[in-house]
Image: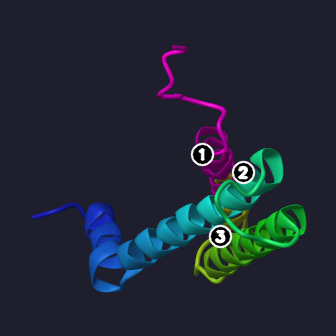
Amino acid sequence: MLPALLRRIAVQLFDNGVLRLIFENTRNMAVSSLITAAGLEVVRAGPGDLDLVNPTVAGHVVVTIGVSLLLLNLGDGLWRLSRMKSHLVLQILLCGAYAFIFWRVVYLVLYFKAGGGMSMNTGG
């Protein structure tokens, strides 16, 4: 038998759908980060093989859509955390930790996707 605290956490995660919400939020964060990175890549490197009238404007539009989706996802996560039935200090700490982790993950995805990391080129 699990201790009472672990049992409550397990019920919240598995029975009340919190784990599903965590994965949905993470997926949405990754997708919106990739959309933003794609727009930044078009702005930085040009359209490549795309036949666009003004690729820079299209890139900025895609970046704006991606950032808007990121902000909506961040707001959704903070909203859900703020509705928890727990002490106010715990809610504030969880919201702060969530926002910090959220932006760090977004930064990492943008860094690696937008050409900043782990390049496959060997220089030859």
Amino acid type at mark 1 = Lys
Q: CA distance from mark 2 to mark 3?
A: 43 Å
Under tag 1, what secondary structure? helix
Up/down of 72 relative to 112, above or below: below
Please name the residue that numbered disc 2 is placed on: 41
Between disc 1 and disc 2, the foreground one is 2
Q: Position of residue 118 (x, y in %)?
A: 52, 28
Q: Are marks 1 and 2 in contact (CB under 8 Å)?
A: yes
Total marks placed: 3
- Counting from the top left corner in percent of width and height, residue 51 is at 72, 69
Which residue position holds label 1?
A: 113
* Along the line of sight, the residue nearer the viewer: 110 or 18: 110
Q: Nearer the viewer, residue 80 or 85?
A: 80
Instruction: Report the span colored magenta.
Output: 98-124
Q: Amino acid at mark 3?
A: His
SS class, disc 3: loop
Q: Is residue 68 left or right of residue 86?
A: right
Q: Earlier in the sequence, mark 2 or mark 3?
A: 2
Q: Is residue 112 above or below residue 47?
A: above
Residue at x-position 88% and y-position 68%? 54
The residue depicted at 37 percent of the width and 72 percent of the height is: 19
Q: Which residue is mark 3?
A: 87
Depth check: 44 or 94 in front? 44
Other-residue count near label 2 (Cα within 10 Å), few / some / many at <14 / 14–19 / ≥20 = many
Q: Is residue 112 above or below residue 9?
A: above
Give the SS element for disc 2.
Answer: helix
Mark 1 crowd level (few <14, some 14–19, many ≥20, 10 Å Cα): some
